[in-house]
Image: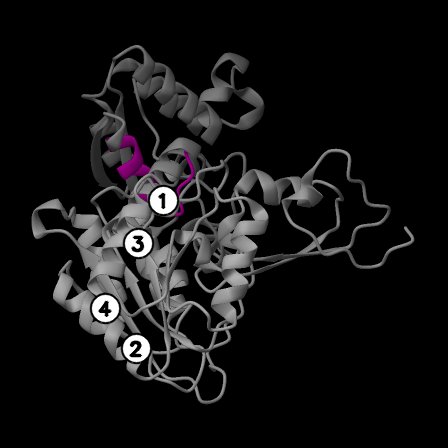
Amino acid sequence: GQIDIVIGTHRLLSKDVRFAELGLVVIDEEQRFGVAHKEHLKGLRAALDVLTLTATPIPRTLHMALLGLRDISSLATPPMDRRAIHTEVCLNDEGLVRSAILRELNRDGQIFFVHNRVQDIDSVAHHVQRLVPDARVAIGHGQMPGRSLEGVMLRFCRGEIDVLVCTTIIESGLDIPSANTLIVERADQLGLAQAYQIRGRVGRSHERAYAYLLYPSAEVLTRDAASRLATLSDYTELGSGFKIAMRDLEIRGAGNLLGDEQSGHVAAVGFELYMQMLDEAVTLADNWYATDEDRLAGLEAQGARVETADIRSGADLHRLLADRPARVYLLAAQASRPLSEREPDYTEETNVTGVRRTAEALLAAHAPPLVFASSLHVYGRSLKGEVTPDRPYGAQDDLAHLSKVWGELCLGMY
C-alpha cells in the first residue's frame, strides 16, 4: 500500500501482482484487452470503479453501454488545428502508391506503409524502394529485436527515415506530426476498429493527411470487408469513432454479455432484428409475459392451440364447457368453488404456476395443449380478476373466482 498510482501493461494482470486496496482501474486502449482481462481486474475487489478509454469501443462494450449496463461519455471535440483525413479506398496500383509517396516527400513529410505480413515484408520494402529510389526506406515490426525496433522508431521520429514499411504495430501509441500519408496494403483483411486506429496515426498536425486503403481486386472482397471499407470511406470527419463503432456493432454483432465473446451472433439478420429475436427468446425461456396477449402468443409458439371466447353469463360458460374435455370442466369447477372446499390435488392447477407446469408437461409429452382464453364479463362488466368497489373479490364469488383463473390467466388445457 505504499504506492498510490501504478501505471503498467498487461503485466499488472499477473497472479503475483496484488493490490492492498484497489479502488479505481483505468483501462486505456480498451480494444486491446480481452473480456477475461477486464473481468480479472474487476474481480480483485467487490466495489471497484472501472473507466475504459478507447476511440472505437468493441461491440460488446458499446452494446452494454446502449443497454444502460454501463455509462458512456463521448469526447467529440478534436484538438485545435486538426483537419479531417482524406481517405481513399482503391485497388492496389503502383502508380497510385508512387504518386502518393512523392507528394508527401515534396512537402517534407513522412509515410507509413503498412504491410501486415512479416514473412515477406522485406520484399515489399525493396519494391517500395524501387518505386521511389530517392526515398529513405526502413522496416519495423514486432518480431525485430527490441533495440533494433527502438532504433528504427527513433530514426523515424527524428526524420531520418522517409517511408516506414511496417506491420500493424503502429496501431496505437504513436504521435508523429510529420507523418501525414498512410498506405495500407490488404486493408480488407483488417478489422474496422483496427483500421480506424491505424488511420489515426496520420493527421496529427495542421497538415492535410491522406490515407490510402488498398485491396487487390473486387473478387477477393467479402461482403463484410466491403462494408468495413465503405464505412471508413464514409466517416472521415474528426471524432467519428463512435459512429464507426456503431457500424462495427451492426457488422460484427454484439457478442455475449454473459460470456467472453466480444462480437458475433448477429450473422446476416442485422442488429435490430437480432435484438428483437433475442428479446423474444429470453421471454419464451423465462415464461414471462407483460400481457395476456403475449402469454397466449408464447404458448402458441410452443405448439399450443388457442381458442378465445367472450363469456357474459354462467349460461355462456356452461354452454362452452359442454363440448370441452372433462379435464377442462373439472378445472373450471374447482376454480368456481370456495378456496376452503377445494381438493388439495387440484389446487395447484388453479394458479399461474400450475397452469404453466401443466402446459410444460403436456408439451414435453408431445401432446399439444388446448389453451382456452376468455375475457369474462358479468352483467356487461369485464372483471378479469379486478377488485371493484361494487363487486369485491371474495371466496364465495364463483364468477370472480372463475375470472381470476379463466379470464386473466388463460385457463383451460388438457
Disc 1, SS: helix
Q: How many numbered tags mark residues here?
A: 4
Q: How much space separates mark 2 and mark 3, taking CA atoms?
A: 17 Å
Which percent across, then down, holds residue 192?
Answer: 33, 56
The residue that mark 3 highlights is 125
User: What range is drawn magenta here?
Assistant: 287-300
Q: Earlier in the sequence, mark 1 or mark 3?
A: 3
Q: Earlier in the sequence, mark 1 or mark 2?
A: 2
The residue that mark 2 highlights is 104
The residue that mark 1 highlights is 279
Which percent across, then down, holds residue 15?
Answer: 73, 33
Which percent across, then down, holds residue 414?
Answer: 29, 17
The residue that mark 4 highlights is 233
Does residue 222 appear in this view? yes
Q: Earlier in the sequence, mark 4 or mark 1?
A: 4
Disc 4 crowd rating (10 Å Cα; few below 14, some 14-19, many 20+) is some
Q: How much space separates mark 1 and mark 3, taking CA atoms?
A: 52 Å
